[in-house]
Amino acid sequence: MSIVRGGGVGKDFYSESEERQALRKAVGELGKKYGYAWFDKQARSGGDTSELWHEAGKLGYLGVNLPEQYGGGGGGMGDLSIVLEELGAAGCPLLMMVVSSSIVGTVITRFGTEEQKQTWLPGLADGSTTMAFAITEPDAGSNSHNITTTARRTEDGWSLSGRKVFISGLDVAQAVLIVGRTEDARTGKLKPALFVVPIDTPGIEFQQIEMDLISPDKQFTLFLDDVRLPREALVGSEDAALMQLFAGLNPERIMASAFAVGIARHALGKAIAYVKERQVWKTPIGAHQAIAHPLAQIKIELELARLMMQKAAALYDAGDDLGAGEAANMAKYAAGEVAVRSTDQAVQSLGGNGMTKEYGVAALSTAARAARIAPVSREMILNFVAQHSLGLPRSY
């Protein structure tokens, strides 16, 4: 399918362009083809979402935000967020879109060499290549300044050593974008640097982390022991790596918002369908305000979260990194909150049925809860807003 490059708005600010409406419809149809039952089966059987991933890639959805000259659709984060949101609303969100298409695709597009773009972007665009992203460390958490994974210069390139945790999708990835630190020759201090590392490079090992979460997307600890890399593994400039890193984290927050909004829509849809039909007395239970009002509130909160997500995507696609940073954090916060509220209210609306596997609602609660934690916690977002939006003193 050819992806049409187009703006995010149609006749006015509040309506999407015809191209984006068509994209929503097409992706929604793909999502319905797979759906929650398939997604849940893959999760519970230890499978993955590669089948859906490859089909979405062939249809052009995974690379809708990447440049046309490298096989992408020529669109932006607004388009890519639609893809993930609609798949999530259908019950089969692709978590690796937050990483592979969004963070890694953006960083390589904006800062990679021509050789790096030609090597990696076509595969990211058509789904034949999946790339992971490794930044989190056991003793660093939200403080990226405490990263200890170190890149040391060698005669012919780099040697990378360290450890990363909670790295998604290493079992399906062909390469990983790793955040390490290099020594500044002038000051002797360590500074961030980004490296593309094929997953089969000698010195790389990873172990799955057992999660109390029903999901086909697995988490890993990544070990790097004197991993030898060529010079061209470095992405962008050593001196600008921090700027490059944050250029990738804004898309991550936008896509995490899309992931959460999709889950919220899916849970709300299940609740609505149930309360319209479930009858205990003379009318469907959805007629009672105790059921109807909480669902109506979630609908309002959902639309507000989506609006902020669309604002963040529009600012990012317009090149306003600073404005996008504020909006992306707010969108991530709002989307995570409504995802938790929506899944919880869906369980409550279904009563005992909400706890059964048949209705597929309770399992969504844990996934939604993760949206308040990753890829950045709600508390760190509130710190950001307090400091940067309100001008309050820094608290950490």
Image: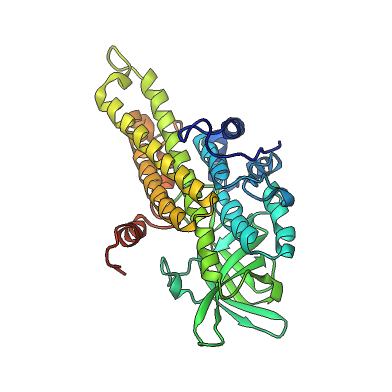
Q: Nearer the viewer, residue 195 or 209?
A: 195
Number of marks in the image? 0
Q: Nearer the viewer, residue 185 or 195?
A: 185
Q: Quadrant of the C terminus?
A: bottom left
- Residue 315 rendering spot, x and y as whole percentages: 49, 49
Q: Nearer the viewer, residue 125 or 354?
A: 125
- Compared with 214, 266 (above or below) is above
- Residue 49 rendering spot, x and y as whole percentages: 61, 45
Q: Quadrant of residue 30?
A: top right
> Can residue 41 be seen here?
no
- Residue 197 rendering spot, x and y as whole percentages: 66, 67
Q: How is the image coloured?
A: rainbow
Q: Nearer the viewer, residue 192 or 370?
A: 192
Q: Is residue 35 left or right of residue 365?
A: right
Q: Is residue 111 left or right of residue 190?
A: right
Q: Quadrant of the N terminus?
A: top right
Q: Residue at x 56, y 57 (%)?
A: 103
Q: Residue at x 51, y 69 (%)?
A: 242
- Compared with 392, 303 (above or below) is above
- Compared with 349, 321 (above or below) is below
- Residue 5 rendering spot, x and y as whole percentages: 64, 40
